[in-house]
């Protein structure tokens, strides 16, 4: 597996509105998408930070703090490598072209992500 960069980060929070307000108002991140209990923000580099509120059902396992997404060159191969290593795989979505993401729990107990970027 070859990690090329950190390309995504996100957090789940019970303080959803306050967190979105902090990220836009204090840190100055640009709002790129918003719906109930989900907001995506864009950094000047083009990278994304996402916030998930308490009503978001798809990321309930984001319980250990912010989640970092490691960009890899070949996502299906990298996921297979995690499987062979016995890593706990969580949710994700990988399409027929190998694009997408896959969440996993690392030995430190935290949730991370592999992403195709």
Image (cartoon, rainbow, N blue to C red):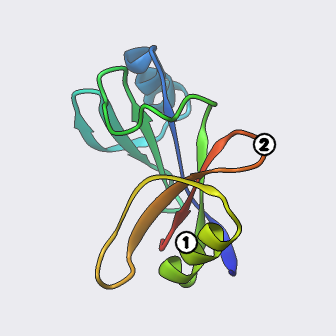
Q: Residue at x 65, y 58 (%)?
A: 87
Query: Residue 112: x, y in percent?
Result: 61, 50
Query: Residue 67: x, y in percent?
Result: 58, 43
Mark 2, residue position: 108
Query: Residue 39: x, y in percent?
Result: 33, 37
Query: Residue 81: x, y in percent?
Result: 64, 76
Q: Foreground: 85 or 44?
A: 85
Callout 2 touching callout 1 (CB < 8 Å): no
Q: Look at the picture and state if 45 lies above or below 21.
A: below
Q: Residue at x 39, y 32 (%)?
A: 52
Q: Foreground: 62 or 85?
A: 85
Q: Is residue 36 left or right of residue 107?
A: left
Label disc, if present, on residue 3 of the rendered structure: none
Q: Is residue 93 left or right of residue 24?
A: left
Q: Is residue 74 left or right of residue 16?
A: right
Q: Secondary structure at mark 1?
A: helix
Mark 1, residue position: 79
Q: Residue at x 25, y 37 (%)?
A: 34
Check the image and name the residue furthest to the left: 35
Q: Foreground: 25 or 56?
A: 56
Q: Residues within 10 Å of mark 1 (few under 14, many from 20)?
A: many
Q: Secondary structure at mark 2?
A: loop
Q: Residues within 10 Å of mark 2 (few under 14, many from 20)?
A: few
Mark with earlier residue (2, 1):
1
Q: Look at the picture and state if 10 lies above or below 37.
A: below
Q: Residue at x 55, y 72 (%)?
A: 79
Q: Quadrant of the N terminus?
A: bottom right
């Amino acid at each position: 597996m070859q990690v090329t960069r950190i390309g995504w980060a996100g957090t789940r929070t019970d303080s959803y509105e306050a967190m979105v307000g902090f990220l836009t108002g204090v840190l100055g991140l640009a709002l790129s998408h918003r719906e109930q209990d989900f907001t995506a923000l864009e950094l000047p580099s083009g990278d994304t930070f996402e916030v998930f509120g308490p009503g978001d059902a798809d990321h309930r396992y984001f319980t250990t703090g912010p989640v970092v997404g490691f960009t890899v060159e070949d996502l299906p191969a990298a996921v297979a490598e995690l499987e062979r290593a016995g890593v706990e795989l969580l949710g994700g979505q990988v399409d027929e072209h190998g694009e997408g993401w896959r969440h996993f729990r690392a030995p430190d107990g935290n949730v991370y992500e592999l992403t195709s970027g």
